[in-house]
Structure formats: C-alpha cells, structure tokens
Image: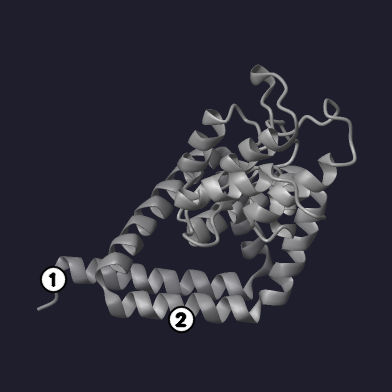
Amino acid sequence: MISDDEKKKSKREKERERANKRYAEEPEYRAKKLARNDAYQKEHRDEIAARQRENRAATREVERKRYAEDPEYRARKLASNMDWYWRHRDGLNAQRREKRSSDAEFRERLIERQNERRHILVYRLSKADYDRMLIAQNGACAICKRKSKRRLCVDHCHVTGEVRGLICHKCNTALGLFDDDPERMVAASYYVRRTRPPDSLMIGAAPEQGSMPGVHGCIVLCAQVGRFGSGAPAIFAAAAAPRGF
C-alpha cells in the first residue's frame, strides 16, 4: 500500500515534469518565469547572498575536515589541483605578470612573500626573527650603520652557516667581492690608507663612537662582519705591521 508521503512525492515529481516541459515548449511561460525569478532575486538579494555564504562556509569546513582525515581524498584533490594548474599555467602566469607590473601593492606583497620563503628555506629565519634583528639594529646596516631604502640582506657565515646580521646591498656586495675573507679586508684597508694622510681616512666607526682612523677602524669592521676565534690576534698583528705592497 502506498503511503501518503509517497503519493505527495509522486505528485510533486509529476508537477515538476509538466512545469519543465512547459518551460521548454512555451516561450511566453518561460519569459514570465524568468521575470518572476529576477524580481524575487532582486527583492531578496541580501538574504540569498547570506545563505550562499553560509553554504560555502559549511562546504569548505566539510572539505577541510575530509582533506585532513582522508588520505585518498587528499591525494585526489592534490592531483586534480595540479592537473588544473598545468592546463591553465600559461594564462595564470600571464595574469600574474600583468598584475605584478601594474599593481605596486601586489608587487610589494609578492616580493615580501618570496623573501620570507627564501629566509626560511636558506637561513631558517622567520619573519618575526628578521623583524627582531632589524629593531635591534635600529633599522640600519650592521656594518656601515646607514639606513637603506631597500630591504636589508641577511648576512651569514659561509663556513658555519650562522646568521650574523642584516646588512645593506653595498656592504653585502663588498663582502662577496672579498670572498668573506677578513685578511683581504684588512689588506685592502692598509692598501687604501698608505696613500692618504693619517687623519683623512675614517673607517667603520659608528656615529655615537666618533671617528676611528686607519687600521683600527678596519679591525672594528672585521669584528662586526666575522668571527675570528683564536686566529684574531695574528690577523690584527699582521694588519698593523707594514707590508711590501
């Protein structure tokens, strides 16, 4: 025996089929139906948008939970995402290049994210660590003590891998050209100093410390950028002694 609920369900299905057939075959009925739908959507736009946001939020929450708990679903989702990316890669890259060239704010955010990823991967230095170092240095280069309009570089020891501080691009380039070699830096200081009057060369002195001429300034410079260990006295003594350059 058919229950009342089943009869009602069968009746609704038949009415829906008749309505769909009429919608497909009668242009006037279709136009009236579309007009009523448009009027309803305009009148209840805010309510419809709120329901859609709630449905999307609920759907995303269910998908996140399933993604975290179901390895097979996660693998299928990743494969689907990668397949979609490779099929649309050229268009996505073109859009990204266009936005980067035309949107200064987007370009700054993108560069900031790239720097953060590089600092974490190369130096294991988080954004919070970088910001703390920058505050400790008063926003200035650890070597020349000058503030730069460009982002300061993360300087590290090429022997131990230890992060030493934040330096400007000029000082970073100088260290690279000297192969991070303290002895060559001291030799360069002596080379420059030998042709100048004794009081004309001021190197490596912080503003609050006053001037520091000649080799003594270079020693401070080397102490700021490197860790010498037990070999430091020999280097300093060699720097102080004249050489046959």
Is 216 left or right of 4, judged from the image as shown? right
Residue 116 point in image, percent of width and height: 55, 51
Instruction: Assign the N terminus to one quadrant of the image.
Output: bottom left
**Taking the image as drawn, is residue 143 in sight?**
yes
Is 139 left or right of 101, judged from the image as shown? left
Question: Compared with residue 171, is residue 140 higher up or lower down, i.e. above or below?
Answer: above
Find disc 1 in the rendering and name its residue.
3
**Taking the image as drawn, is residue 142 in sight?**
no
- Classify 10 Å Cα crowding around label 1: few (below 14), some (14-19), many (20 and above): few
**Dividing the picture into quarters, in which one does residue 45 lie?**
top right
Q: How is the image coloured?
A: one colour
Label 1 – label 2 distance at C-alpha: 47 Å
What residue is rendered at 45% in x and 47% in y?
Answer: 53
What residue is rendered at 77% in x and 45% in y?
Answer: 190
The mark nearer the N terminus, 1 or 2, is: 1
Residue 191 point in image, percent of width and height: 82, 48
Instruction: Assign the C terminus to one quadrant of the image.
Output: bottom right
- Checking the image for residue 79, the label placed there is 2
Is 84 left or right of 73, judged from the image as shown? right
Q: Secondary structure at mark 2?
A: helix
Give the number of callouts.
2
- Checking the image for residue 74, the label placed there is none
Question: Compared with residue 186, is residue 95 higher up or lower down, i.e. above or below?
Answer: below
Q: Amino acid at mark 2?
A: Ala
Residue 201 point in image, percent of width and height: 82, 31
Q: Amino acid at mark 1?
A: Ser
Residue 192 point in image, percent of width and height: 84, 44
- Classify 10 Å Cα crowding around label 2: few (below 14), some (14-19), many (20 and above): few
Question: Compared with residue 233, is residue 5 higher up or lower down, i.e. above or below?
Answer: below
Q: Which one is in front, 112 or 70?
A: 112
What residue is rendered at 33% in x and 76% in y?
Answer: 73
Q: Which one is in front, 24 or 145?
A: 145
